């Protein structure tokens, strides 16, 4: 009788694991499967770092970290990356030097070997930014500035096309946001547009420069879903099937803005948000893609 009960339990667990593996994309699946082997595709982790951005792209050859979240979430960022078995980060890209993108950098440099660092070339006067420059110099981390038109190869044909910033650079109070590094990750039929905190002015420039080439399977919603980004004409070109919003629960900026969510709703873009879904993992084999969220909240 005991044997029989154990057998049924094991059978049930096996069936559940198979079902959950098969419906990787569906919410409500309680078995925590690992993302498929990265050797056969590309995985993008939009890491839940509260109100900030930290996006890890893993191909079979490289691990690339785009932004590092804010200061309070450093430990969370480090432990997440370590949990992926990563000790060397091939490329770190800082889209712009605001604290919610740069804040985790000291911890990243302390815990991981960083082979190459890129930023937007935009400077600021904060202590955080000054310490970042000093540490990078002291540790002799190879450093370059990214501008529109450059490409970074990530292996297996995965390419990061840098779309922005470019001359003439934006000025004014929103210059750091508007001069964010914007990059389109392309892997076979899959693509993901990474926007930093680029606002409407930058979006309009991108629309003029790239038009429908902005079309992407997944959009990392600009500026945490703020209504200063995700302008209608920009979204019309991007036409994302999935929009991912990296945002902190109950944040003081009230991100994401209801009007942004309404636009995604009107476009039938499926929305994932780190404040509700936790870390969002997108896997693609270059043909199709699957989205997994950390929290089962439905
Ligand atoms: Zn930000």
Image (cartoon, rainbow, N blue to C red):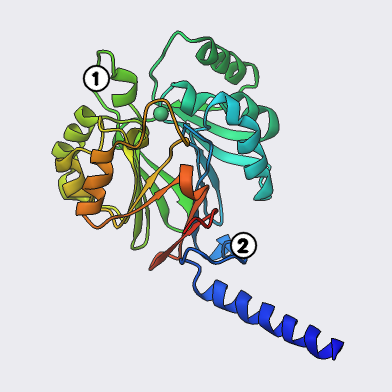
Binning the other alpha carbons within 10 Å of mark 2 as few (below 14), some (14 to 19) or many (20 upward) gives few
Query: Percent from the top left, x then y, of residue 195?
Result: 34, 37
Corner quadrant of residue 136: top right
Residue at 56% over, 72% down: 20
Marks 1 and 2, Cα distance to the nearest angstrom?
42 Å
- Name which quarter of the figure residue 158 lies in: bottom left
Q: In the image as oriented, which residue stretches furthest toward the front?
A: 1
Q: Is residue 225 in view?
A: yes
- Identify the residue at horizontal 65%, vertical 21% (top origin): 139
Closer mark to the observer between disc 1 and disc 2: 2
Q: Residue at x 43, y 37 (%)?
A: 247
Q: Secondary structure at mark 2?
A: loop
The disc placed on residue 34 is: 2
Residue 197, given in percent of the width and then of the height, sits at: 35, 30
Quadrant position of ligand 1: top left
* Residue 141 visible to an observer of this rendering: no
Residue 170's mark? 1
- Please determine whether, in this image, residue 195 is positioned above or below residue 252: below
Left or right placement of residue 176 versus residue 246 in this view: left
> Who is closer to the viewer here, 233 or 205?
233
Q: Residue 104 in the image: x percent, y percent?
A: 57, 28
């Amino acid at each position: 009788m005991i044997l029989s009960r154990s057998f049924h339990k094991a059978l049930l667990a096996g069936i559940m694991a198979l079902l959950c593996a098969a419906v990787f994309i569906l919410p409500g699946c309680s078995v925590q499967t690992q993302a498929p082997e990265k050797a056969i595709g590309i995985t993008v982790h939009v890491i839940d770092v509260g109100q900030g951005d930290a996006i890890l792209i893993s191909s079979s050859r490289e691990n690339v970290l785009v932004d590092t979240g804010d200061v309070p979430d450093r430990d969370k960022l480090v432990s997440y990356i370590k949990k992926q078995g990563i000790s060397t980060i091939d490329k770190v890209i800082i889209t712009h030097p605001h604290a919610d993108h740069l804040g985790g950098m000291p911890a990243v440099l302390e815990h991981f070997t960083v082979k190459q660092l890129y930023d937007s070339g935009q400077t600021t006067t904060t202590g955080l930014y000054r310490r970042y420059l000093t540490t990078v110099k002291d540790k002799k981390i190879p450093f370059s500035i990214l501008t529109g038109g450059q490409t970074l190869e990530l292996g297996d044909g995965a390419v990061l096309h840098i779309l922005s910033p470019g001359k003439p650079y934006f000025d004014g109070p929103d210059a750091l946001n508007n001069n964010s590094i914007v990059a389109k990750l392309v892997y076979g039929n899959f693509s993901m547009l990474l926007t930093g905190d680029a606002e409407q002015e930058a979006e309009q420039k991108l629309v003029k420069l790239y038009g429908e080439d902005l079309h992407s399977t997944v959009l990392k919603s600009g500026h945490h879903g703020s209504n200063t980004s995700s302008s209608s004409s920009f979204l019309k070109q991007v036409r994302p099937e999935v929009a991912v919003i990296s945002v902190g629960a109950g944040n003081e900026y009230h991100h994401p803005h209801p009007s942004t969510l309404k636009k995604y709703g009107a476009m039938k873009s499926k929305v994932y948000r780190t404040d509700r879904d936790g870390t969002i993992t997108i896997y693609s084999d270059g043909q199709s893609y699957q989205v997994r969220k950390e929290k089962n909240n439905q």
